Amino acid sequence: SPPRGTVRSTMSVDPLRSVIKPRSLARPRKVKDVPFVELHAGRLQGVVSSGSDAERVYVTWTANDVLHAAAVDHRGEAVWQRELGPAEYKHGAGNSPILVDDLLVIANDHTGESFVVGLDAKSGDERWRRLRQGGTESYATPLLFDAADGQEQIVVCSSAEGIAGLSPADGAVLWQSPNIYLARCVNSPFIAAGMVFSGSGEGGNGKNLTAVRPASDKGG
């Protein structure tokens, strides 16, 4: 296990030379020092993937049961940083962000007051926040779905809320199928044959896979 006191850092890789270029979040490119946390039975924190575009890299993490988000440019310089709210997870958080044009979307479905938030990717300012019921924590990354009529939808999953499609414009619920997951959502939803597939499961308590055909403005 990594030693206690380990802090988060970012790094870039030169694809032509396979040279790793570390970008520590400590001074002078400081975003926030985040202590390493070991969970019960030797398990480590949930793993978060970063997001990126042509200008910035976006990261999330939890510290002291609070969810944070930050952006750094491609030189590793901090652009913005935000505290988003409580984040209570038994196995560490897995709040991987996604980009929808210039909107950074982060789902925070945990045991306490939950939400999905849309941030301005350039400034970090909050554009909208959709409050959600707390319950069994979810580790599923949101999915961008293009409906047959061209409507973009942000698909989010949790045991408390089921599966739902949100509007990227304001976070409004476009459709929802509640009470379909038997356990926590760990895997991220995916698209096949015009449907969204997602699942849930934990330990030896069984797993289930669900397929939903999302509704759109034209119905369906």
Image: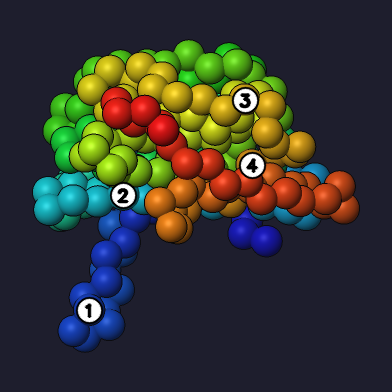
- Give the Cα distance between marks 4 and 2: 21 Å
Quadrant the N terminus occupies? bottom right
Q: Which residue is mark 2?
A: 51
- Give the Cα distance between marks 2 and 3: 28 Å
Q: Earlier in the sequence, mark 4 or mark 3?
A: 3
Q: Which residue is mark 4?
A: 185
- Give the Cα distance between marks 1 and 4: 34 Å
Q: At numbered mark 3, what does the secondary structure look like: helix, strand or loop?
A: loop
Q: Residue at x 12, y 53 (%)?
A: 54
Q: Earlier in the sequence, mark 2 or mark 3?
A: 2
Local packing at callout 1 (Cα closer than 10 Å; few below 14, some 14-19, many 20+) is few
Q: Which residue is mark 3?
A: 178
Give the amino acid at mark 3: Pro
The reply to whether dot 1 and dot 4 touch (C-beta < 8 Å) is no
Give the amino acid at mark 2: Gly
Q: Residue at x 70, y 36 (%)?
A: 181
Q: Which numbered disc, 2 or 3, marks the residue closer to the eye?
A: 3
Q: Residue at x 48, y 47 (%)?
A: 196
The reply to whether dot 4 and dot 2 touch (C-beta < 8 Å) is no
Q: 54 left or right of 133?
A: left
Quarter residue 174 falls in: top left
Quarter residue 137 falls in: top right
